């Protein structure tokens, strides 16, 4: 009983520090107030999509869950359905649903950092940093988007990988994919770790079953099979090779998606092959699993075609796990800066071209650092992944 309240022992016997309670409450209050201050702004996505969808639920009740008026998958639409009961204006209800994802994101970041300890980064501090990450702050409370929700489940999947809980890792990923198609960016890391550790081949099938169950529920309310499982297909039918994304293809605005889709996929595939070799040639430690995961979720939106401005969201959040790591602490700042710039350009109607092009150079530089760090194999550590 000689330890102070802010100093406890972790599982490894290393003293575990915590932020004072008053700091947590104060910072949490500021995070909430910052979001509420942005609530009056109605984004184009909210005006054209989210608010009409919510109004559809308010007008037609639970039967609207079978409607074909949306191109988002069922789990998010169900949350939006629950938002219909909130006694506030529709666009406020949309944002309340979204910022609930911010809370989940903070909890998931804290859980992963706690699993990685001992580390210089306190779990509570990491959670607070995530809440104040510019794109996290703006994504839900200003834009009305819900990227924090699927990113939270990706982090839970990563935590399961760090704990050697391969089954739950695949299931968490399936849940993330049921919210947003962008969860597929995490799949290369999941597959590589599964292959290296000879996980059961039934796990991907189990993930498919989970995704199918979560996605097929609208059919119970009358939605057709093709419409239910075609929501992600319709999201990829665009003419632009890149839509506001801070990626390589910002330099090729005149190239259409039909012209550049196949070359872009081949380039991304080649880059992921390099990632696979880089990961395989070094030790399979917890730190390298984190680095692998961050690298792939950053490379995919950098090199895949038809990416949007929000698609680096998961990479920005996962990069926070690199804070305090030698030669990699700059990465979260670089990704946060380019992400913020993409959002600013979006809200200003993309009236400026050169900032996006310059930001894409910074993005390529940051991803190059990640890949180089992964390539540099290190001797196996005395203690790698211990089952918890």
Image: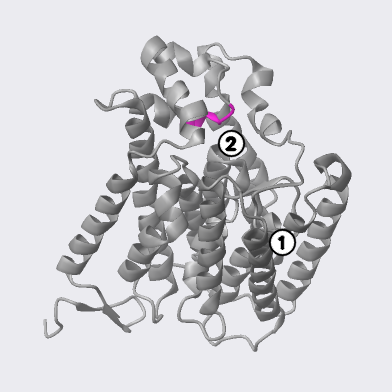
The disc label shown at residue 195, or none: 1
| Above or below for 275 versus 350 | below
The disc label shown at residue 55, or none: none
Name which quarter of the figure residue 6 lies in.
bottom left
Q: Does the magenta stretch include residue 81?
A: no
- Residue beneath the point at 25% across and 74% down: 18
Magenta stretch in the rendered image: 71-76
Residue 97 image offset from top left, x and y in percent: 37, 37
Q: Say few, some or many: other residues with alpha carbon within 10 Å of mark 2 (under 14 / 14 to 19 / 20 or more).
A: many
- Which residue lies under the disc numbered 2? 211
- Residue beneath the point at 48% across and 70% down: 321
* Number of marks drawn: 2
Q: Can residue 1 be seen in this view?
A: yes
Residue 239 image offset from top left, x and y in percent: 77, 37
Quarter the N terminus occupies: bottom left
Q: Which of 164 and 270 is in front in this view?
A: 270
């Amino acid at each position: 009983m000689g330890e102070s309240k802010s100093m406890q022992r972790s599982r490894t016997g290393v003293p575990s520090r915590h932020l004072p309670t008053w700091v947590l409450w104060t910072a949490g209050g500021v995070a909430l107030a910052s979001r509420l201050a942005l609530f009056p702004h109605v984004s184009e996505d909210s005006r054209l999509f989210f608010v009409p969808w919510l109004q559809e639920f308010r007008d037609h009740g639970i039967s609207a869950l079978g409607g074909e008026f949306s191109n988002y998958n069922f789990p998010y639409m169900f949350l939006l359905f629950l938002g219909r009961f909130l006694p506030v204006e529709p666009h406020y209800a949309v944002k309340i649903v979204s910022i609930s994802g911010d809370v989940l994101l903070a909890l998931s970041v804290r859980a992963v950092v706690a699993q990685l300890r001992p580390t210089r980064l306190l779990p509570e501090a990491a959670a607070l940093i995530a809440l104040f990450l510019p794109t996290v702050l703006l994504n839900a409370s200003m834009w009305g988007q819900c990227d924090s929700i699927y990113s939270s489940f990706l982090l839970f999947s990563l935590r399961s990988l760090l704990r050697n809980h391969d089954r739950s890792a695949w299931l968490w990923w399936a849940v993330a994919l049921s919210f947003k198609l962008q969860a597929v960016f995490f799949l290369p890391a999941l597959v590589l770790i599964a292959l290296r550790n000879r996980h059961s081949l039934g796990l991907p099938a189990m993930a498919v079953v989970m995704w199918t169950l979560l996605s097929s529920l609208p059919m119970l309310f009358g939605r057709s099979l093709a419409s239910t499982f075609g929501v992600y297909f319709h999201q990829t039918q665009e003419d632009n090779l890149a839509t506001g994304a801070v990626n390589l293809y910002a330099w090729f605005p005149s190239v259409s998606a039909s012209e550049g889709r196949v070359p872009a996929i081949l380039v991304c595939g080649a880059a992921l092959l390099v990632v696979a070799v880089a990961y395989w040639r070094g030790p399979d430690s917890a730190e390298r699993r984190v680095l692998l995961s961050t690298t792939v979720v950053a490379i995919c939106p950098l090199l895949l075609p038809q990416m949007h401005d929000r698609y680096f969201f998961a990479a920005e959040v996962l990069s926070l796990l690199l804070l305090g790591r030698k030669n990699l602490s700059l990465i979260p700042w670089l990704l946060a800066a380019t992400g913020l710039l993409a959002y600013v350009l979006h809200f200003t109607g993309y009236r400026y071209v050169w900032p996006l092009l310059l930001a894409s150079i910074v993005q390529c530089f940051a991803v190059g650092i990640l890949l180089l760090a992964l390539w540099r194999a290190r001797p196996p550590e005395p203690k790698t992944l211990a089952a918890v």
